[in-house]
Image (cartoon, grey):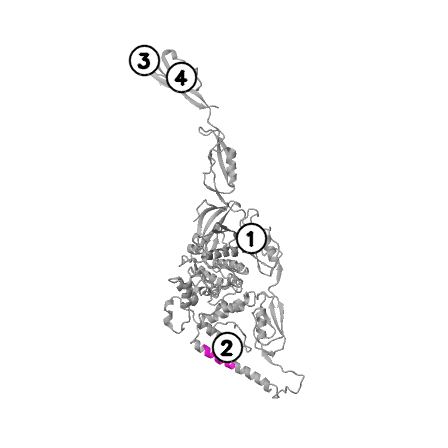
Amino acid sequence: MLKPGMILCDRYEILEVVGAGGMSIVYKARCHRLNRNVAIKVLKPEFSNDKNFVTKFRVEAQASAGLSHPNIVNVYDVYDDDGMYFIVMELVDGITLKEYIEQYGRLNMDKALDFAIQIASGLEAAHESHIIHRDIKPQNIIVSKNGNIKVTDFGIAKAATSNTLTSGAMGSVHYISPEQARGGFSDERSDIYSLGITMYEMVTGRVPFEGDNNVSVALMHIQNEMISPRQYYPDIYSSFEKVILKATQKKPERRYLTASALIADLKRVQNNPNIDIVVAPTAITNSPTQEWTKEDVQAIRDGSAYKDPYDNSQLNAFAVNPPVQNDMGELRPIGGISPIPVNNQRINQMIDDSFNDDYDYEDEYEEEQQQPVKPRASVKKIQDDYEEDEDEDDGEIDPSLKKAVTIAGIATAVVIAIVLMVVLGNVLGWFSGGKKKDKTTDATTSETTDLVMIDVLDYSEQKALDMLEKAGFKNVKVEKITSEDVPEGYVVDQSVKPNDAIPAESEIIIYVSGGAEQLEVPNVEGYSDAQACQMITEAGFKVKHAYAFDDEVEKDFVIMQSPAAGEMAAADSEIIITVSNGPEDKEVPVPNLYGLTEQQAKDALESVNLKPGTVSSENDETMPAGQVISQSVVQGTPLTEGATVDFVVSEGPEEKVTMYTANISGTVTCNDASLDGTAVTVQIRYDGVTVSEQTITVTAGTPNSVSGSKSGLENQGGKADIIIIDANGSNVTAQFSCSTSVTYDEFEEPQE
């Protein structure tokens, strides 16, 4: 472990440990080259010699360094220094979402929605760069002091390609997707599942599945039914609950297909009223990232293998979270299209999927990836499909799946019979007045065959063309149209309705989305926040704010924007503007100024971005003239950069002179009996100046003591005498016997 004060690469000074993960330790450090604090993530020593771990660590750096988004922690640099592997990242001042929930309890709806949208926005940016996080959990999400969300720790992220498969599952067991738990293929929908579990914890304060060990929890993700959030807290928006349940569907194809679609639904939910209730601590205090062993993966696969759905004895281990009931949700057929649009294949597929927990998502994904298409993110379609899913998921199959299959089989037979009657009727002329067409009477007339139109809505352009070709349609044209609801490259409409019978050579037009109308993004960098918002709105876009400290851009002015000025973006899409919070209020320790000259003290303050305040001077017996003897703020006290510090400079020892005080004492005795009982004033004088007066009552023959003093004398040897005045103001000194004595006190005074 690195210690505070250590310097890495002659640049980064380690300050303190701020966190530790499964493979690495995170330190707070100071970059002396750019004068800023950073986070340094160092691979633990025990993994430095493990090529597998080092490779994953490098993958994180490569994946993260290419991402730039307000909701993703920025990566500044990557180092391999003499066997020590570390990444230099943005240091976010805040706490993890896990700590936030532990401190404040479950989130209110407004904050949960805001946090969820920000997390999804970060994932959206990563997914657009073909990067999958694969370990989304509250511990990897940082809540900054100003409320911004940052997704961090792309520790097991991997660039997603059409043929990327993994044999080992990775992730945190309480948030892992079913396909990850199986050790199967992970894609963007795996991140959406983990985010759905995170949203579940945000609104309930707990995770949906808890068990004795990792394998039991992983099995619950694969085959157990979650308790709905509203069963814990009925105040949760029902619409928000639906979003969470859709995001956490067991089968990836039934979740949101993209983060964009998830964001669209979350923003709809934001229109609901505020509900501010904060209760319930989280039940799980930590959920570390796990690298599953082969034995764990095999145990999960064994535990999730096919079990008789009617054997209740197999469900005893899941009393809290019972296994998911077999459903008959609508699925697109894969691998071929029936020329007759009946539901036999779809029903059979659903039956197989319901009873086969080892459904191979990898094969399905590989088949779809043979045509490189952009994932769908239709806002409107996603919502409509979800409403249908809710109808299917909420109700149990009653009385049994067997009855449902029987009814479906009867319906299928009826449909097939009707189709056969129509075909046979056309051949025999039943629908043309009983006259059978003679195909041999006109040699120039070729025989035609009617085909039943299939449904290609919402499929990619290439997939739709392949489906139509397999169904026998040859005359297919493609027309591009704009659409705000359907993603670019997917079918919006078709000229022939599904189930209509038409000649095989008939022209069919499929209308493919060209995406939303594209508009040019205005340049708002350098403008004030208010001006930028107005310019973006007038240009046909929405505004999303991010905030950052900046030493050069004035507070409340735009630092940067995304997309950049001049780029084309979909109408009504979001333009992210990063607004300056002004210079960051950084704190520095006050240096020790004692003993420095005035100029040295000023230089020491300015070297740490502090300012010299009032400079005064005083005499000091111990400190030579010109050196600092005191400062207004104690050494080591943290102050915000730019603050002022006052200090006092010595004038040296004070110059002094020797001075004297004359202490005069004496006695007076009355010699005239006629003065008995009268009051007289005795004046003591020193060098002719009265220094003391006192009144005494005369008693002839009795001595009276008198005294006085004179200070501020530069020398000794003055003359003291006594003068006595009676009540009439007459000098009667001659009628008294007087004696005086003088002593001197010596002392030093500052020279004026």
**Tag 2 or tag 4, which sits nearer the N-term?**
2
- How far apart marks 1 and 4 lie (CA) works out to 89 Å
Q: Secondary structure at mark 3?
A: loop
Residue 712: give x, y in percent of width and height.
44, 20
Contact, mark 4 vs mark 2 (Cβ under 8 Å): no
Residue 470: give x, y in percent of width and height.
57, 75
Q: Which residue is mark 1?
A: 578
Count the labels in the image.
4
Q: Which residue is mark 2?
A: 344
Above or below — where is 541 with respect to 662? below
Q: Nearer the viewer, residue 544 or 48?
A: 48
- How far apart marks 3 and 1 lie (CA) works out to 105 Å
- How far apart marks 4 and 3 lie (CA) works out to 20 Å
Question: Which amino acid is tagged 4?
Answer: Gln
Q: Secondary structure at mark 4?
A: strand
Contact, mark 4 vs mark 3 (Cβ under 8 Å): no
Q: Nearer the viewer, residue 94 or 360?
A: 360
2 or 1: mark nearer the eye = 2
**Tag 4 or tag 1, which sits nearer the N-term?**
1
For the stretch drawn in magenta, the main secondary structure is helix
Q: Which residue is mark 3?
A: 701
Q: Secondary structure at mark 1?
A: strand
**Tag 3 or tag 4, which sits nearer the N-term?**
4
Residue 288: give x, y in percent of width and height.
42, 57
Q: Which residue is mark 4?
A: 683
Query: Which region shows up in magenta?
Result: 404-414
- How far apart marks 2 and 3 lie (CA) works out to 149 Å
Question: Which amino acid is tagged 3?
Answer: Gly
